[in-house]
Image (spheres, grey):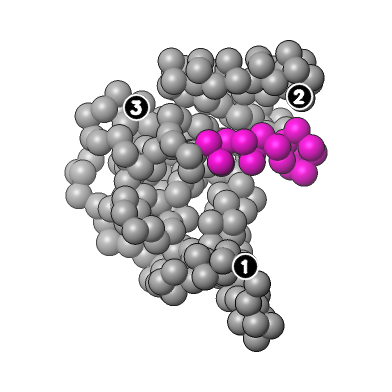
C-alpha cells in the first residue's frame, strides 16, 4: 500500500484551540465571568469529543513519545502494532501527533483500518500526523486524556516522556480504583519499562501499592503476544 496519506475526513471534527487558554485557566483565581466562560469551553470540548469519537467500535489506545523518528526501533514496533491491530478489527486511537503516535496511526492506515487522533496544540512537537482518518483538536489536556481512555478496551504504552508517564499512571489509577474495567495494559519497549518496574517494586516494598498491582502491566515486545493480551479485554 502507498505511504501517501489520504485526505483527512470529518473536517467538522477539527477545532483550532484558543492560544494559551489552558495556561490562563491554570494560573489561579480569576473573575467569576472568566471561570464561567472556561467552564463553557470545557463543556463544549467534551461534547465535541463525544460526538466525534462515540461510534468508534472496538478500540485500542496507543500512547508514546512524539520524539522517535521514522526508522527508530520503537517507531517500527508501533507501526507493526498499528497494522496488526487494524487487521484484527480495532480502531487505533492515539494522541494524534508525531513519533510513536504517527507510527501506530500509519500502520493502521496502511492496513486499511480506522486511524484516529486526539491532538493538542503545543508550542513544539505537536501537529496532527498525516495518517489520520479523523482527528479532534483539544485545548485542555484533561479533556483529551478522558477521550483517549473513555472509548478504548485496551491500552498500549510505549516509551515516552512526562506526557506518556502521566497517561500511564492516570490510566493505571483508574483501573486500580475501579473507575474503569480492568482492561489490558500492555507495556511495549521492555528495556525502557524495566526501569519503571524498579519504581513499582519500591512502591510495593513501602506499602504504597499492593503486591497484586505487580501484575497490572504486561510487558512484551512481541506484537502477537500483545494482541492476545488485548483480546482479553473483549472477554
Quick one: label 3 or label 2, which is nearer the N terminus? 3
Dot 3, how many residues are within 10 Å of its Cα: few (below 14), some (14-19), or many (20+)? many
Answer above or below: position of 233 versus 120: above
| Local secondary structure at mark 2 | loop
- Read off the residue under disc 3: 74
Residue span colored magenta: 165-181
User: Are the residues at dot 3 and dot 2 in contact (C-beta closer than 8 Å)?
Assistant: no
Secondary structure at numbered mark 3:
helix
Distance Cα–Cα, label 1 vs label 2 = 32 Å
| Viewer-side label of 1, 3 | 1
- For marks 1 and 3 on the same chain, the one whose residue lies earlier in the sequence: 1
Q: Which residue is drawn at 31% across and 39% down?
A: 67
Label whose residue precedes the other's in the sequence (1 or 2): 1
* Image coordinates for residue 94, horizontal then vertical, percent: 46, 46
Inter-mark Cα distance, 1 to 3:
39 Å
Q: Could you tell whether 28 is left or right of 158 in the image?
A: right
Residue occupying the point 59% across, 59% down: 143
Front residue of 156 and 33: 33
- Say which quadrant the N terminus sits in: top left
| Comparing labels 3 and 2, the label whose residue is closer to the camera | 2
Report the label total. 3
Q: For mark 1, what is the residue?
A: 28
Give how far apart the Cα atoms at labels 3 and 2 are: 29 Å
Q: Is 168 part of what is drawn in magenta?
A: yes
- At horizontal 64% and vertical 50% (from top left) the residue drawn is 150
Q: Which residue is denoted by mark 2 in the rendering?
A: 209
User: Which of the image's four quarters has the C terminus?
Assistant: top right
Amino acid at each position: 500500500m502507498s505511504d501517501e496519506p489520504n485526505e483527512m475526513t470529518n473536517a467538522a471534527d477539527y477545532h483550532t484551540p484558543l492560544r494559551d487558554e489552558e495556561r490562563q485557566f491554570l494560573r489561579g483565581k480569576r473573575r467569576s465571568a472568566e471561570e464561567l466562560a472556561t467552564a463553557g469551553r470545557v463543556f463544549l470540548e467534551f461534547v465535541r469529543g463525544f460526538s466525534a469519537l462515540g461510534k468508534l467500535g472496538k478500540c485500542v489506545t496507543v500512547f508514546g513519545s512524539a520524539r522517535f523518528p521514522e526508522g527508530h526501533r520503537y517507531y517500527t514496533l508501533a507501526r507493526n502494532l498499528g497494522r496488526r491491530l487494524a487487521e484484527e478489527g480495532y480502531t487505533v486511537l492515539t494522541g494524534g501527533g508525531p513519533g510513536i503516535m504517527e507510527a501506530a496511526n500509519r500502520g493502521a492506515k496502511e492496513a486499511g483500518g480506522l486511524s484516529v487522533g486526539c491532538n493538542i496544540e503545543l508550542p513544539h512537537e505537536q501537529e496532527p500526523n498525516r495518517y489520520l482518518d479523523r482527528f479532534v483538536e483539544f485545548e485542555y489536556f484533561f479533556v483529551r486524556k478522558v477521550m483517549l481512555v473513555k472509548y478504548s478496551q485496551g491500552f498500549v504504552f510505549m516509551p515516552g516522556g512526562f506526557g506518556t508517564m502521566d497517561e500511564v499512571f492516570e490510566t493505571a489509577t483508574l483501573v486500580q480504583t475501579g473507575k474503569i474495567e480492568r482492561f489490558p495494559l500492555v507495556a511495549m519497549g521492555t528495556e525502557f519499562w524495566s526501569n519503571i518496574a524498579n519504581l513499582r517494586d519500591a512502591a510495593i516494598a513501602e506499602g504504597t501499592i499492593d503486591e497484586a498491582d505487580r501484575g497490572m502491566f504486561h510487558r512484551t515486545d512481541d506484537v502477537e503476544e500483545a494482541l492476545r493480551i488485548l483480546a482479553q479485554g473483549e472477554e
